Amino acid sequence: MAVTATAKQEEPRVVLSARGLSKSFGAFMAVKNVDLDVHHARVHALIGPNGAGKTTVFNLLTKFLQPTAGSITLMGTDITRTPPDRVARMGLVRSFQISAVFPHLTVLDNVRVALQRPSGLSTQFWLPVSSLDRLNARADELIETVGLKRERNALAADLSYGRKRVLEIATTLALDPKVLLLDEPMAGMGQEDIGTVANIVREVAKTRAVLMVEHNLSVVADICHHVTVLQRGEILAEGDYAAVSADPRVRTAYMGTEEA
Amino acid sequence: MSEMTQTAAKPRIERSATASRTYTIFVIIGLAALILAPMFFYPIFLMKLLCFALFACAFNLLLGYTGLLSFGHATFFGGAAYFTAHVVKEWGFPPELGILTGVAGAALLGLVMGFFAIRRQGIYFAMITLALSQMFFFFCLQAKFTQGEDGIQSVPRGHLFGFIDLNNSTNMYYFVLAVFVIGLIVIWRFINSPFGMILKSIRENENRAVSLGYSVARYKLGAFVMSAALAGLAGGLKALVFQFATLTDVAWQMSGEVILMTLLGGIGTLIGPIFGAGLVVTLQNYLATSDFPVTIITGIVFMICVLLFRRGIIGEFYASRLGRKLGFEHRR
């Protein structure tokens, strides 16, 4: 299933930036002095060996963790002290490494929950659930975009791991975010799903910024415009994939064994 | 693989259709039984049962559908009983207005308690609610209008809407039944509403709900206030049924009792708490005249329940083969 509507590629500009971002847990510095610029209309990959601090950077950017030092700016607004739900409402939406779906809700309901808030249908406790049916058209559109049409009425818990990740992307897209942070979106997926998700990410990034943590280097080489390599919480190298993969430090630290 | 999920998905929908049909039949039978019950049972006993059933359902709205274990629900139940008793007796409010005053007071108390407790989780949440309800207990012990150890006695039941004499116990019973049914409808609607959908998603995966931009604390507070208000409805009603409000209703034992009822009946099932309340109230009533110590018996029943039927009576029934055949599914 390919993404049907193709948008025009827009011009890149910085939308999310971090300066001197640091996080320590007791004496352990998980993230040290990280500077990061995420551009509109670009796919930015964050790679690095296990324990390099990629997920911590994600948690800091989305405010699920409070940074020890440094600042974060989202579209010109300082969000260093903003709570995570506010940040999400400002258009910075993340996915999680462990699949984050609502397991005992159907695929359709999962997407509708995401649509409820932007549609102003989340606080009405006096209306029947059927009042949410007017979100169905948009929800079905999103479900079709990610190729989950046949599983529309299945419980999320019954989906395979890869399909759950795909569903998560659909719910993330439902918020129409300005910046998408995807934490290992392709981990544990079959080849077919990887292709679907890669296409979705490429399409989505024409009009949005995408920052993704990814281990699958062929995917990174294929769809990412910019790569940042983290090692032990610090930036080791930065640039496009060709430049980064040619960097001898990166090769020894990370790619030595995993030549793409 | 998608083929498989498809076939797995389909029966679920059909099953939920059977479930709703069985549910409708059960509701009709239950309602008919409650309408006919005063011909066979002592009305005061039935009214007590309905009050506690409503209280347990209100509590379950919080525990079962939001996942918050409050140890301070006696505050709302007993607080509302005091408010209703006071305005009816001292200010001459009609019964319907008296109960509404109780509900409003309980909702307000819920807002305050919820505001302090909601940001904590698990045992800390339970401890804060317990501490605040103990504070309210001492307030009731000291305050003038509650009349301390005596409680507010001989509260007049008055005339509903000015013309239905509630001193007639049949009238009173049907009034209580009507309020009980309205309370259940409110709970049912609340759970099956756009708001209820968000509550469900928060219970399923709180972090994901945050990342979708929901202020989780506000939704939990909303559920807390709703639960408090409905517990207040039960408490106000109880004050009119027994025509008094005392410290027993605000004591921590009452908070424990409602937890017991809900667990016995089945957390997160709409009708479980009704059965749990029925069992506990019946036990109390029939053992009160016997030589057995009531608390020991209910304690033993509770232990048996925790050891053998962890889902509660109704929860176990839903999960049993018969329950599944009738189309129920217990999800926890």
Image: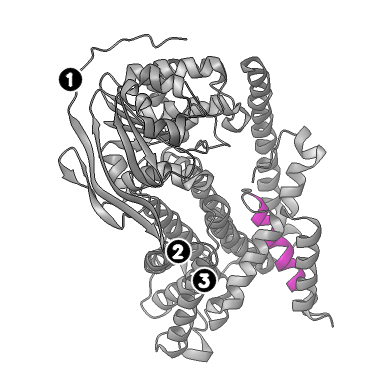
- Label 2 to label 1, Cα distance in Å? 45 Å
Label 2: few (<14), some (14–19) or many (≥20) C-alpha neighbours in 10 Å: some
Q: Earlier in the sequence, mark 2 or mark 3?
A: 3
Disc 3: which residue? B72
Residue farthest toward the right in the current orientation of the protein: B291
Q: Is residue A240 left or right of residue B319?
A: left
Q: Residue at x 46, y 86 (%)?
A: B138
Q: Residue at x 38, y 47 (%)?
A: A233
Q: Is residue B36 left or right of residue A193?
A: right
Q: Residue at x 49, y 42 (%)?
A: B201
Disc 1: which residue? A11
User: What segment is highlighted magenta in the picture?
Assistant: B271-284
Label 1: few (<14), some (14–19) or many (≥20) C-alpha neighbours in 10 Å: few
The question of residue A209 being in magenta is answered with no
* Secondary element type, mark 2: loop
* Secondary element type, mark 3: loop
- Label 2 to label 3, Cα distance in Å? 15 Å
Quadrant in the rendering for residue A42: top left
Amino acid type assigned to the residue bearing label 2 in the image: Arg
Label 3: few (<14), some (14–19) or many (≥20) C-alpha neighbours in 10 Å: many
Which residue is more in the foreground, B144 or A219? A219
Disc 2: host chain: B
* Secondary element type, mark 1: loop
Mark nearer the viewer, 2 or 3: 2
Disc 1: host chain: A
Residue A243 spot, x, y in % from top left: 31, 24
Residue A254 spot, x, y in % from top left: 45, 34
Amino acid type assigned to the residue bearing label 1 in the image: Glu
How many numbered dots are placed on residues in this image? 3
Q: Main secondary structure of the magenta part?
A: helix
Amino acid type assigned to the residue bearing label 3 in the image: Gly
Above or below B191: residue B230: below
